[in-house]
Amino acid sequence: MGEFEIATIPSLPNVAAFTADALATERLDDSAFAGLHAFLNLARNVSLDGLPVTWHLPGPLTIGASLYEAGIEPTEAFALAVKVVRSKLRDVAAEISGALPASPQLVMLDEPALADLMSPDFPIPPDHAIDVISSAMASLPGDVVVGIHCEELCDLATMLAAGPGVISVPVNEKLVDWAGYINRFLEDGGVIAWGVVPTGGPIASTSERYWRQLSELWCELVARGCDPVALRRQSMVTPGGSLDAHAVSVARRLARMTAEISKRVKDQANATRFALGA
């Protein structure tokens, strides 16, 4: 699956100097989107059209929180964030569709601010946060799948209430507390991307420990009522975070371990399907 990340707003020290119109009308030929155009040029050259493409965009909750920290009043900050993200979601999706018309798209909204949402000093309440995220996601056409990504443990109920088709969360034993929410999400056809290989701190030399942690979490979720078949068949595995801070050799090792765990998940899913006669 082709994957890239793009930026949508200037760095935080300059955010307050931009008006709503300036942010919302930023052109896709701006240098912030150089990675997007480099990816699309390469994709055309290697005939990627028809293969799925995953791309990331900073989410409205996180942008709104950043604008608030830069001095903008909360109501205006989050309204502006929704306007910006809605505009960029439509523009980037259209750009990719124009270059790769046969490729299905999955866009992940990066929302690290979700990890701070339950803090008493967060600028907006959870119900407003749900509206902010879901309003941005609603701007995309129905053939583009929208997900939410948070590298830290967050309130899963709020994340799911926004209505994503995919959620990306780190492997963490505390997720068993949301087993009921996870099971309902899977029953509704949702897909979970498990951040199984941490990208910060010491990195193991093999994937065995990370596979064991994922397996133990799944066993606990099944014990709490999650469907074991859906859990395996509607899961993806990913690195726990971005790889751009690592040397190429380390990034390759992280990618290799993620691929090894992915193969084990696929093998288990196939074995389960065979055992059930599906």
Image (tube, rainbow, N blue to C red):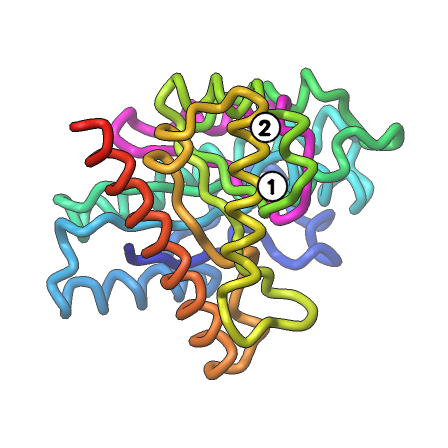
Give the labeled residue for mark 1.
111
State the quadrant of the N terminus. Answer: bottom left
SS assignment at label 2: helix
State the mark number for residue 159.
2
Amino acid, disc 2: Met
Q: Is residue 64 above or below residue 128?
A: below
Say which residue appears at 71% left-offset and 55% top-offset: 12
- Circles 2, 1 touching at the beta carbon (< 8 Å): yes
- Please provide the residue range marked out in magenta: 132-160
Closer to the chain start, of discs 2 and 1, is: 1
Q: Is 180 on the left-hand or right-hand side of 68?
A: left
Q: x, y percentage for residue 19?
A: 64, 41
State the quadrant of the C terminus. Answer: top left
Q: Is residue 78 above or below residue 243?
A: above
- Mark 1 Cα within 10 Å, few/some/many (few <14, many 20+)? many
Say which residue appears at 35% left-offset and 49% top-offset: 54
Amino acid, disc 1: Glu
Q: Nearer the viewer, mark 2 or mark 1?
A: 2
SS assignment at label 1: loop
